Image (cartoon, grey):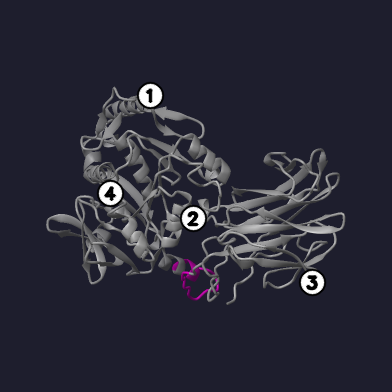
Amino acid sequence: MRFDFDNFRFADPDSAGSALAVVDMQDGLSWNTLRARTGAWAGGQRRLPPRHRRHGPEGARRGLHHVHLGQHRRPQGVQIGRESLGLFAGWIRDCLRLDAAPVFMDQMLFSFDFSLFNVAGALGLGGTCVLCPRELTAERDAFAAYLAHHRVTMWASTPSFVRQQLLNPAFNAATLPELKVFLFGAESLSPTLAEALWERFPAARIVNSYGPTEATCSTTWVEIDAELRQQAPNPFQIGRAKPYAALFLDQGELCIAGDHVMRGYLNRPDLNQTRLFLHQGKRAYRSGDLAHIDAAGLVHFRGRADDQIKLHGYRIELAEVDAALASLPGVRAGAATVCAAPPATEGALAQLYAARPPQGSAYVRVLNPDAATATVAVAQGHAQAIGSNGAAAATYAVVKGSQPFTVRVDGKEAATLQVQPDTFTTLLLARTGGKLSVVPLDDGSGGPDALKAELRFYNAIRDCEGAQLALAPSGTSIFQAVRPHSAVHRAINPVSATVDAACGSARAPELALPALQPGDHYSLFLTGSAARPVLRGQVSRTDPYSK
């Protein structure tokens, strides 16, 4: 079964009706059930007075609505008509060459217009939309296992989200053998990221796309074929016009025309007057994006004509930030700008005028679980005293990925190691019979989350076979059965809390967490002995990089 976007009704009702149309972590919805519930909803709407209905002639006239915040925080409702949605679904069906009944990974919020790709694709092709909530994607191993269980074949996301997944060694074709197509949008796609993805998924097809909400989420697309891969422009072009779209430049600004362009902003005639116009009898939209169109019809993105930026696919008006700063007591004026940060940054590392670590860098720190203080240095980083009553771990030093570096403890060389690029690693100092060794612990995702903080829990006690961390005094579990000399992590809401840890029946004194902010990474170290565990904590930080 599938949904026919040409006629806006379910088609092939006798085909695979028991197959899943939508699935999440708790439940699934078959095509038969989806069709029945949709019919029941439509029947209920018909019994309402016309002015209260959500469908029918009025709904068809006004179309679907996407809402985003624009200048001065005023909501901008974007009216997308049925004709536009039908064209979008037809492009997925006719141009992308997906397998029958594809399985779409969907981790995007429904408020993010890009998520329409997964919904329209699954409906139009009779496939399955696999919903992936934030609490699942924060647990990388569980996330990969979930995708493998549902045999996901199609991945659509921003490049930054897949970059986070590449920090997981299990994110590869061996774990996800059915995953064959990656489609990106909302951010620039670099050859470096594409090559890293091909290294994990050698047979994968990679598609780059572009399009504002006002043009039904997507207007251009291009598959990164062998020729483009060899050329490796940085970033890749955003594609050619879709069959139903017309593109042209007006003083360098990219303009988009066609029936996929929105019918207008909801209740915003001022914006309609400045952004919309007619071009050869079709609706047209001024995107505000600067571009170049080459002889092959490929569009090269050149930035914005205004001060709008995108972060993780979301539009941000810097003028709004300026206005908010200026409204603070004692502030006469404010100015916001953009600071670049490495692909995997620990918390908010970008600093105005700060040098950026080169591509392929990695981040390494040392953890001292002992009571005695140790002075440590990683690579060319400065010496730091850790342990005793001070910080248990040093700040992260910047090293060159895949290249050897030395670790010095109390002035003596303790180890020579190397780590993968774009990773975070904690080196645990372990002493056995007076002999010192260095145990690397994978810190997992180093990418910041704009909405949540991250807790990392380290079991640094050699004979603690199942460390636990829980909220106090409720006892609600956060981590269970953490092996000796290993680490786990998870995203949390940025709230204040008190936690305690245990080795079996032996409990460590409670520890109050600081008021964490979105993007913070907080490390909790279980030290001491299995009989007398001690819980210590600190905010993770990275050394400033200097050339």
The earlier-in-sequence mark between 3 and 1 is 1
Question: Relative to 533, is 198 on the left or the right?
Answer: left
Q: Nearer the viewer, residue 5 or 369?
A: 369
Q: CA distance from mark 3 to mark 1?
A: 67 Å
Which residue is the site of mark 4?
A: 79
Residue farthest to the left, as pictured = 280
User: Would you call the spot at circle 3 few (<14 residues within 10 Å), some (14-19), or many (20 or more)?
Assistant: few
Marker disc for residue 163: 2
Which of the image's four quarters has the C terminus? bottom right
Residue at 39 percent of width and 62 percent of height: 72
Q: CA distance from mark 4 to mark 1?
A: 34 Å
Which residue is the site of mark 3?
A: 411
Q: Which residues are magenta?
A: 323-338
Q: Nearer the viewer, residue 7 or 105?
A: 105
The earlier-in-sequence mark between 2 and 4 is 4
**Do the numbered discs 3 and 4 sit on residues whose CB atoms are within 8 Å?**
no
Residue at 27 percent of width and 60 percent of height: 271
Say what amino acid the circle numbered 4 marks: Gln
Where residue 326 appears, as percent x and y from the top left, is 48, 71
The earlier-in-sequence mark between 1 and 2 is 1
Task: Determine if the magenta segment contains residue 326.
Answer: yes
Front label number (4 vs 1): 1
User: Would you call the spot at circle 4 few (<14 residues within 10 Å), some (14-19), or many (20 or more)?
Assistant: many
